[in-house]
Image: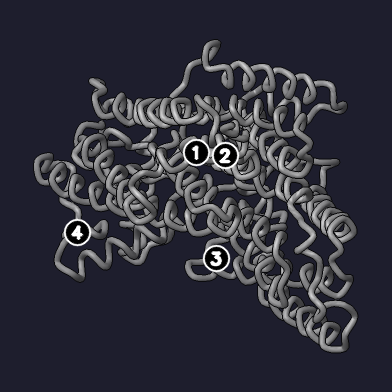
């Protein structure tokens, strides 16, 4: 009598959906992602009229042109420090190669010669857009490399990278010069590094933790809103450990371990000493008052910064207890964080301006200077009720956006968040505990950051702070729910999601490219943000 096929054999005979979703293979898939980014860029970015994304293309380029003439940085709101520096050096390189004439303010034609000005500014803006594409492409490749360290299956890493590369945030930032991308990506890379080293212990793990801290500070140096993502990391990383993440023998009370810890303490002290003038400048009351900063808590500066450091320390101790990390390694990692953050802060000395220092050292106060009236009044209120009311209102707005139906947007990761939520429930019901907790931590972090971003309208440009969290949460679940790969409808659902992701993600760039409005609205702010670069179509101040 013939034997009936077992369920295991049936599942093995059924096609693995991951094979179908990655049919181009490992290298072919990477090439396709890069080609897709380039195609989208040239269709909806490179040739678009130069003033279409004046906020912030013009603002960044204005500062870069001024700095190439030996003048100081002109823009400090976010602060966009790294973006401006990269554009400055990019323009200088292109000029030295003979590829860009308009590389400094003195090389720009006057506004009175409209035709020459338009041509020069077109070349400068297009050069900036190419840099944005290069940064986005490099970030996508870095994301892929780090995802390979987080999930063992290259197919899942490739699918996650595809979702990230064609998310709404990357779609916007791969063709314009804004500060959010270079603020979010270092912090996301820090998260992935911490996840990877938390799962597999090694002698050099404190160095990786220090690198993660340095990346967080680099993100903060480019946009103060990165503090929201940085503040979520200590809590979000708590579930990301494993039995293989316990400290290796070197760190378990050996003399060499304590010597390494002592050396880390010395390095932290030296780095802090080198960065202290920048920190002191950041808390200088005269500079803060000149910049119209207001203390966030009890009329004093530095309170929440100390609280954030205490939170990070408490979470590190809790992580060490949960995942059997030794005292020596935990202390060495704490010192590495101090050293890494201090070294990254020294980058401000490359083109020092006290206005950058005070914004980066006091990020929430900087954010409050641009908050709406309701947020400002809630922050200065004597009790917490006003702030809690705004948070509840923001949560409702975010949940409506996550439905897509109640608040449509060019954010394809909304559809992925549905699957993540369902996957968390499914994994928990099937006996998984760690993977659903990890994904839940990332999803809650994304929702929390979006709630705080609602006060600024939660614009498409801000999606880059939270889209990667949703993508990583989905990859972690997919890695654990292996039986779903062989389910009957998995391939069809996956294909539909990828197509939706691509189409919805490109909606905003396409809409932006075909807008019919003119540049007249730029005249409302150009004299304030671009005092050294008059525009032909704007009236000149008398």
Tag shown at residue 89: none
Residue farthest along the front direction in this orientation:
1
Pointer 4: residues within 10 angstroms few (<14), some, or many (20+)? few
- Kindly identify the residue that appears in the image at 74 percent across and 76 percent down: 268
- Residue 45, x across and y down, in percent: 26, 38
Tag shown at residue 13: 1
Are circles 1 and 2 on residues that touch, CB within 8 Å? yes
Are circles 2 and 4 on residues that touch, CB within 8 Å? no
Q: Is residue 60 left or right of residue 366?
A: left
Residue farthest along the top direction in this orientation:
406
Earlier along the polypeptide chain: callout 4 or callout 1? 1
State the residue position of label 4.
107
Tell me if residue 143 comes above or below residue 410 in the rendering.
below
Pointer 3: residues within 10 angstroms few (<14), some, or many (20+)? many
Tell me if residue 451 comes above or below residue 204 in the rendering.
above
Earlier along the polypeptide chain: callout 2 or callout 3? 2
Q: Disc 4 versus disc 1: distance between alpha carbons?
A: 67 Å
The image quarter containing residue 515 is top left
């Amino acid at each position: 009598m013939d034997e009936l096929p077992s369920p295991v054999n049936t599942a093995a005979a059924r096609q693995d959906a991951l094979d179908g979703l990655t049919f181009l293979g490992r290298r072919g898939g990477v090439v396709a992602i890069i080609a897709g980014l380039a195609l989208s860029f040239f269709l909806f970015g490179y040739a678009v009229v130069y003033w279409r994304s004046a906020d912030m293309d013009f603002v960044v380029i204005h500062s870069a042109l001024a700095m190439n003439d030996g003048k100081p940085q002109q823009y400090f709101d976010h602060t966009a420090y790294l973006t401006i520096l990269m554009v400055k050096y990019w323009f200088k390189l292109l000029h030295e190669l003979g590829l860009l004439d308009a590389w400094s303010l003195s090389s720009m034609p006057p506004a009175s010669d409209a035709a020459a000005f338009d041509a020069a500014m077109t070349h400068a803006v297009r050069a900036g857009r190419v840099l944005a594409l290069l940064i986005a492409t490099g970030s996508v490749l870095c994301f892929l490399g780090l995802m390979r360290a987080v999930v063992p299956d290259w197919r899942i890493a490739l699918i996650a990278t595809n979702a990230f590369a064609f998310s709404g945030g990357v779609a916007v930032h791969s063709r314009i010069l804004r500060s959010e991308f270079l603020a979010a990506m270092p912090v996301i890379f820090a998260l992935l590094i911490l996840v990877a080293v938390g799962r597999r212990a090694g002698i050099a793990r404190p160095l990786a933790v220090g690198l993660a801290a340095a990346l967080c500070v680099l993100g903060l140096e480019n946009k103060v809103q990165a503090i929201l993502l940085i503040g979520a990391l200590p809590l979000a990383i708590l579930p990301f450990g494993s039995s293989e993440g316990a400290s290796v023998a070197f760190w378990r009370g050996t003399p060499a371990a304590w010597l390494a810890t002592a050396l880390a303490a010395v390095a932290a002290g030296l780095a802090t000493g080198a960065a202290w003038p920048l920190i002191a400048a950041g808390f200088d009351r005269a500079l803060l008052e000149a910049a119209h900063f207001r203390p966030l808590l009890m009329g004093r500066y530095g309170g929440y910064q100390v609280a954030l450091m205490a939170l990070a320390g408490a979470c590190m101790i809790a992580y060490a207890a949960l995942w059997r990390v030794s005292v020596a390694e935990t202390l060495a990692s704490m010192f590495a964080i101090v050293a890494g953050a201090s070294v990254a802060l020294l980058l401000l000395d490359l083109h020092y301006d006290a206005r950058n220092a005070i914004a980066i050292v006091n990020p929430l106060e900087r954010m409050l200077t641009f908050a709406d009236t309701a947020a400002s009044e809630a922050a200065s209120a004597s009790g917490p009720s006003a702030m809690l009311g705004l948070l509840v209102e923001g949560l409702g707005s975010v949940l409506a956006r996550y439905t897509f139906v109640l608040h449509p947007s060019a954010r394809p990761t909304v559809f992925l968040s549905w699957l993540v939520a369902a996957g968390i429930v499914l994994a928990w019901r099937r006996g998984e505990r760690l993977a659903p907790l990890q994904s839940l931590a990332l999803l809650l972090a994304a929702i929390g950051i979006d709630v705080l971003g609602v006060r600024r309208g939660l614009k498409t440009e801000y999606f880059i702070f939270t889209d990667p969290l949703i993508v990583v949460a989905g990859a972690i679940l997919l890695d654990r729910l292996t039986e779903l790969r062989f389910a009957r409808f998995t391939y069809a659902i996956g294909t539909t999601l990828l197509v939706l992701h691509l189409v919805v993600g490109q909606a905003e760039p396409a809409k932006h490219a075909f807008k019919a409005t003119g540049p007249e609205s730029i005249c409302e702010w150009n004299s304030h943000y671009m005092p050294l670069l008059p525009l032909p179509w704007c009236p000149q101040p008398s």
